[in-house]
Amino acid sequence: MFIQVIDFKTDRFDEVRALVDDYRSTTQDRRTARRGILTKSRDDDNRYVNIVFFESYEEAMKNSEMPETSAFAEQMMKLCDGPATFSNLDVLIDETL
């Protein structure tokens, strides 16, 4: 399993959410992301972290290569307060406690 973590700041969250909803509907049967968790910081009202799960790094790269993903990222960055940071993580242990 592979996880991508996207950390971003915005004061335009409603617009980001609408953009995400549009991306999800237009890529319904083609995107390779299997799960997404969007979180909001309790310490910084404008900071959000999106955690996206893929079966593998290769599946994540297929998703990244989709034209819709590039367009989504470009539009999202226009809504953010500065550049987002990305962490690309291979899952070593996955335990339910």
Image (cartoon, rainbow, N blue to C red):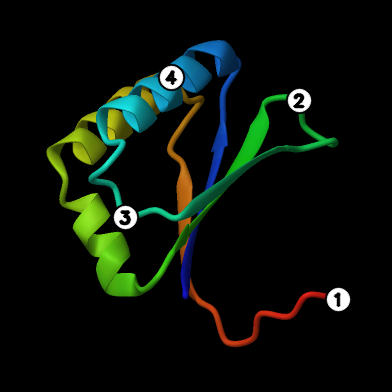
Residues 44 and 1: in front is: 1
The total number of labels drawn is: 4
Kindly report the distance in space between the C-alpha atoms of the residues bearing marks 3 and 1.
27 Å
Q: Which residue is mark 1?
A: 97
Q: Which residue is mark 4?
A: 79
Which of labels 4 and 3 is toward the front?
3
Where does residue 19 sit, x and y in percent of width and height? 40, 20
Residues 26 and 68: in front is: 26
Q: Which residue is mark 3?
A: 32
**Mark earlier in primary sequence (3, 1):** 3
Where does residue 37 sit, x and y in percent of width and height? 61, 46
* Labelled disc at residue 45: 2
Q: Secondary structure at mark 2?
A: loop
Kindly report the distance in space between the C-alpha atoms of the residues bearing marks 2 and 1.
30 Å
Q: Quick check: marks 2 and 3 in contact, CB under 8 Å?
A: no
Kind of residue at disc 2: Asp
Q: Secondary structure at mark 4?
A: helix
Q: Secondary structure at mark 3?
A: loop
Asked where in the image residue 55 lies, by quadrant, the reply is: bottom left
